Amino acid sequence: MRISELSRRSGVSIPTIKYYLRDGLLPAGRPTAANQAEYDEDHVRRLRLIRSLIGVRGLSVSATKDVLAAVDEQQGDVHLLLGLVLGALPVERSGRPPRRDGAAEPAGARAAAGDAAEDVAALTAEMGWKTSPNPPAAQVVAETLETMRALGVDYDWRSLVPYAELADRAARLDLDQLRDAGDPLQQAERAVLLTVLLEPALLALRRLAQEHHSALRFGNG
């Protein structure tokens, strides 16, 4: 297809496509004449994934380029591919060490963080979940538990088990919806859309359910 058709099919403007081509996010098409090329379905799928990473997940062009480079290396492993595009796995940049804050952390804070991390490890073990080492989501859970304890709320990993069970069911539903997308890039794009776009709606549904059950328990009829 010509670049105009590629633009129509992917929903990405021609100037933006040309920018992605220049910057290496999108592979070049097959040359047909001077300053002309043809593109195929792989370009359509790649553009849709780029659009979802930048427009939906909110990554910068540079970060998207890094993710796509890692995706190209993991085309045969859908599990790793999904982890990369969803941010569950870090994208390693050769020659760039991980950034660290220069300030030393107080000993008490390190101890609290260690307790929270142990809680998360106990929770994932209880659920039988197999995850990568130190995933970002586990750090979020640990920081949340740490904050709640600092505020005097008696909350540990056992309190999270019912919520983890609900999350497990939701995750199964998410992955069930990827079955119709046979191509890995299509699966990656749909995973980003389902995860990022649905999260606000899931939170809103929780609020609606809370209002309903509050009215049943405490309302005046």
Image (cartoon, grey):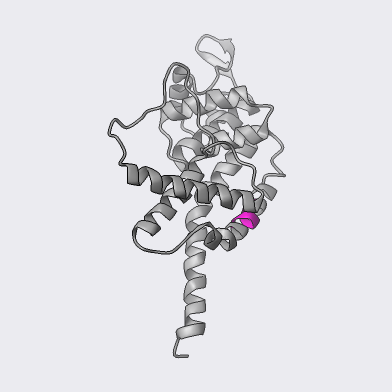
Percent from the top left, x then y, of residue 213? 52, 78
The residue furthest top is 34
The residue furthest bottom is 221
* Residue closest to the eye, 4 or 196: 196
Location of residue 32 with respect to 193 vertically, above or below: above
* Residue closest to the eye, 48 or 36: 48
Q: Quadrant of the N terminus?
A: top right
Examine the structure image and report whether residue 75 is included in the region drawn in magenta. no
Q: Residue at x 64, y 39 (%)?
A: 187
Res. 155 in view: yes
* Residue closest to the eye, 48 or 218: 218
Percent from the top left, x then y, of residue 137? 50, 45
**Figure quadrant of residue 148:** bottom left
Location of residue 20 with respect to 80 vertically, above or below: above
Judged left or right of residue 187, residue 24 is: left
Q: Residue at x 58, y 37 (%)?
A: 132
Percent from the top left, x then y, of residue 88? 54, 39
Percent from the top left, x then y, of residue 110? 38, 42
Q: Residue at x 66, y 47 (%)?
A: 175
Judged left or right of residue 80, residue 214 is: left
Question: Magenta residues?
Answer: 167-171
Numbered circles on residues, count: 0
Res. 3 in view: no
The residue furthest left is 103
Q: Main secondary structure of the magenta part?
A: helix
